[in-house]
Amino acid sequence: MKALLVVKCGSTLPALRERRGDYEDWIVAGLGLEPERATVLVPPEGAELPDPDAVAAVVVTGSSAMVIARQAWSERTADWLRDVVAG
């Protein structure tokens, strides 16, 4: 079975995270899924991104990082997302 991925590019504010969880929790709940149905990858922490052919769907979280900063993890994730979309 192909994976449903949540690509976590950042976290919400600490006080909000303590009360309501973080972005990936909101996304999984909003999709009506059990948490084990989604795989959360965190590129800013060096997560390895899977082969695009192994992916059924991707949801990308928000981030406080600026895309114009062209951080290595962000550029790598952007390239990978282009490959996923190109399918």
Image: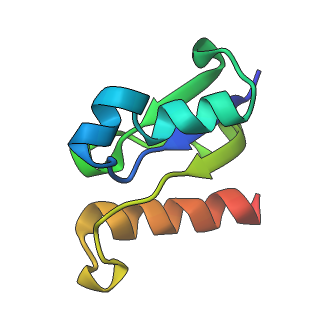
Confirm whether residue 55 shows in the render: yes
Above or below, 81 relative to 6: below
Above or below, 71 relative to 22: below
The one of 87 and 64 positioned closer to us in this rendering:
64
> Residue drawn at (28%, 79%), measured in percent from left and top?
70
The one of 33 and 67 positioned closer to us in this rendering:
33
> Residue drawn at (74%, 66%), measured in percent from left and top?
86
Q: Please name the colour scheme applied to the rendered image.
A: rainbow
Please state the horizontal and vertical placement of residue 33, each as a whole percent of the image.
71, 22
Please state the horizontal and vertical placement of residue 77, each as a whole percent of the image.
44, 60
> Residue drawn at (49%, 36%), measured in percent from left and top?
24
Please state the horizontal and vertical placement of residue 56, each as a whole percent of the image.
75, 38
Q: Is residue 8 left or right of residue 46?
A: right
> Residue drawn at (63%, 62%), measured in percent from left and top?
83
Confirm whether residue 50 shows in the render: no
Q: Is residue 36 left or right of residue 41?
A: right
Q: Quadrant of the C terminus?
A: bottom right
Q: Quadrant of the N terminus?
A: top right
Please state the horizontal and vertical placement of residue 58, each as a whole percent of the image.
65, 47
Q: Please, which residue is most extreme toward the bottom here?
A: 68
Report the label total. 0
